[in-house]
Each structure stands twice: as structure tokens, then as C-alpha cells.
Image (cartoon, rainbow, N blue to C red):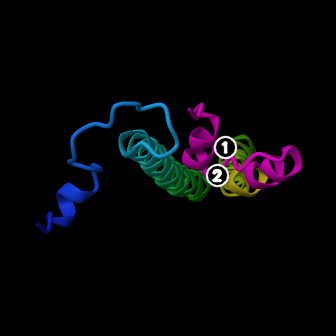
Amino acid sequence: MQLPSQLAQFGSFKAPVDNVYTKDAATSTNAFTILEKFFSNLLGILTVLGSIFFIVNFILGAFSWITAGGESGKIETARNRMMQSAIGLVIIVAAYGIVGIIGTIVGIDILNPAKMLIELVPTS
């Protein structure tokens, strides 16, 4: 029987196995995979929201600069707002690289948490 792809993302629809604490347990593996997908999607959404916040904040800073009317205090405030927005975007983009580098140095695959969690499950 072929399951629709929308339902297949939620894992196995088979009866639960007796020992859910083994590496071979389908429910345990699927739970970790679903958890990994959840955090991956959450991180993606937060990255998109951060990028949208950058764009809005940068445009508002640029608009403030244009409407400053030559006042040095307003121009400096607008310039600082635009600069801080750009720095925030660089931090958002660099976060992926930093996490990958730290994971490599420590020896943990932080960007693949399901694999890491499955290895922590005791085997019988």
C-alpha cells in the first residue's frame, strides 16, 4: 500500500516495536528524524525572519537618512541604524559557518542532530 507523501513525513505507521531504545527501532529513528526536521525548519524560519528584519530596518534607516534634512545628529542615527542592521545580517549568515566549525573542532556533528541522538540511544 502506497502512503501519500504528506502522511509519509510523519514516520512509520507500523505497530510500535517492543523495545524503543534500540538503534533499529523504527519509531525511535523516526522520532529523531522528525525532531531534526522540526529544528531545521525552525532555524530556517528564524533566518528568514532575521533577514526580513534586516531589510525593513535598513530601509527605515535609509529613509531616516534621506529625510534628515542635513542635520548631523539625525544622519548619524540613521547611519548607525543601517550599520547595525548590516552587522546583524552578517552575524546571521556567519552563524551557520561558526556552528559547523565548532562542531568540527569538538568532533560533534551539530548540524545533524538526529544522527547524534541515535548514537546516544543505548543498544540491547
Which of the two labelled residues, at mark 1 and mark 2, occupies the earlier sequence position?
1
Residues 57 and 106: in front is 106
Count the numbered circles shown.
2
Residues 3 and 41: in front is 3
Residues 96 and 31: in front is 31
Is residue 102 located in the magenta-colored stretch of the structure? yes
Q: Quadrant of the N terminus?
A: bottom left
Give the label on residue 111, or none: 2
Give the label on residue 74, or none: 1
Main SS of the magenta segment?
helix
**Residue 51 at x, y = what percent?**
53, 55
Amino acid under disc 1: Lys
For mark 1, give the secondary structure.
Answer: helix
Give the label on residue 64, or none: none
Q: Residue furthest left?
A: 1
**Residue 27 at x, y = what percent?**
36, 41
> CB of mark 1 within 8 Å of CB of mark 2?
no
Mark-to-mark CA distance, 1 and 2? 42 Å
Q: Residue at x 42, y 39 (%)?
A: 28
Judged left or right of residue 99, residue 3 is left
Q: Which residues are magenta?
A: 99-124
Q: Quadrant of the C terminus?
A: top right
Q: Residue at x 58, y 55 (%)?
A: 58
Q: Residue at x 60, y 31 (%)?
A: 122
Amino acid under disc 2: Leu
